[in-house]
Amino acid sequence: MRDLGYSLETAVADLIDNSISADATAIDIFCEASAMEPVLAILDNGCGMDAAELLAAMRHGAANPREERSPGDLGRFGLGLKTASFSQCRSLTVVSVKNGIVSGAEWNLDIIDAADDWILRVLEDDDIRTLPYVDRLSQNGTAVIWRELDRLLEDETGNRRDEVVNEKLDVLEKHLSLVFHRFLAGEIRGRSRIAITVNGHPVAPFDPFCRKNTHTRHLPEEVVRIGSAAVYLQPYILPHHSNLTAREYDFYQNRSDFISNQGAYIYRNGRLMAWGDWFRLIPKGEATKLARVQIDFPNSLDEAWTIDIKKSRSRPPLPVRERLRQIITQVSGASTTVHRGRGQKLFQEVTAPLWERYSDQAGIRYALNGSHPLVQRLRERLDEEGVRHLDLLLEASSASLPVEMVYSDYSTNPREVSQTPSVQDVRDRLHDLRRALWGDASGNAEAFRDIIRSTRLFDDHVEIVEEYMQGEFHEPYTQ
């Protein structure tokens, strides 16, 4: 039972499910790894349990998974509290208050081992008063306390132990911010917004669909009926990274790699169960990394979705997979269009781009534009042999474009890929560009403006270009 595959974050999430099912609105997680007796506690202000309800909750397999449950119930097997806790600790204590009456019980694996029997210790009031954090409970609520944290601490000691625990708590906070983001944001119809803290630090909701950004696309919602229940499929296309603010980009890149987290996001009663999978309908790739599909189903379909005990794996029933297969081309195509449209815009925003894109029977290739005004002016200044050398240089430069390296860097860290050089003296470079085009002649302001855009040498120096255009041509420069 200790080795079902829980991590710290999935174990804590399983316990938070119980708090949400008990209508809690505040859930506080405390972890004291450096104390003499390390402890992790989860407190909520839910409805609480009386002595009989607590004993039933401590029993393994306390629920029939096929029984009809309330729509807000996030449990299923009646195993989560015990299996999740034992995956991290050897001592599980639960104290609950209902209408001011306190009850407590404790499972200790060492006692069970010694007696070779399932012995549950029922706590007296004096025992409960000595427990950490229980004094924070009010008229109603529950505290789950883990001690003897053998799995959490991984036999580490001293500063290294603190470092390991802090890393795990950071992962825990990010996991909870995603799994319960709709509860944290107050999006669940019929229930109040939930607040979760980790060692006093509020957990902020992480929306995997970036819905607050105006560039996020909402494709038409689909509905699949399975018996009397409805499954909702809502596709989203995330914005291109250029349409994310620096804060948004860091937020999303830090919490979930764009490529590995594309795919379906499966929610049961608003709780995220599994994500980042296309169920082998299409392969994951760079072009589809912005595609997401939010799938909502009620707990009455648990068996059809083959939900496991950890609530970390699920597989859509056949009708849902078939509908997803039908819309997957549209979703992946829309994600691809975001990238392709951005590339087309870069080519179309100038009349004479420095690079050109060709698509024919030989495939897609990119080449330096031999008709660009800068290239044409250089040709005029060269003799016949010099022109041949120039054409050879252009062809070699185009053929040696490091496509694989660009793809690798851009797909991994797109914000760090920048082709804009640092121009030491922008005004001198602008003057050199103008002389290269027209010599001592004044030149044409509109044509010069277009060539400035095409070279992309001055993208980071718009204000200086603006001053230059005003001073030399008496016209503003518009990027």
Image (spheres, grey):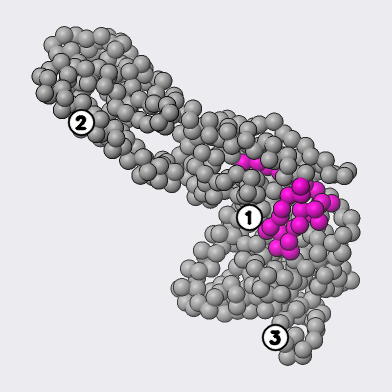
Image side of residue 175 versus residue 395, left or right = right
Q: Which residue is tagged 2?
A: 393
Q: Which residue is tagged 1?
A: 176
Image height of 180 relative to 343, above or below: below
Spatial separation of the CA atoms under disc 3 and disc 2: 77 Å
Give the crowd class for mark 2: few <14, some 14-19, many >=20 residues within 10 Å: few
What amino acid is found at the position of numbered circle 1 in the picture? Leu
Please identify, in this view, whether the residue under mark 3 or under mark 2 is nearer the observer: 2
Spatial separation of the CA atoms under disc 1 and disc 3: 31 Å
Name the residue located 14 percent from the left edge and 13 percent from the top edge: 439
Q: Which residue is tagged 3?
A: 110
Q: Secondary structure at mark 3?
A: helix
Give the crowd class for mark 1: few <14, some 14-19, many >=20 residues within 10 Å: many
What amino acid is found at the position of numbered circle 3 in the picture? Asp
Q: Earlier in the sequence, mark 1 or mark 3?
A: 3
Q: Are marks 1 and 2 in contact (CB under 8 Å)?
A: no
Spatial separation of the CA atoms under disc 1 and disc 2: 55 Å
Residues drawn in magenta: 292-318
Quadrant the N terminus occupies: bottom right
Which quarter of the picture shows residue 458? top left
Pick out the residue farthest to the front. 361
Q: Secondary structure at mark 2?
A: helix
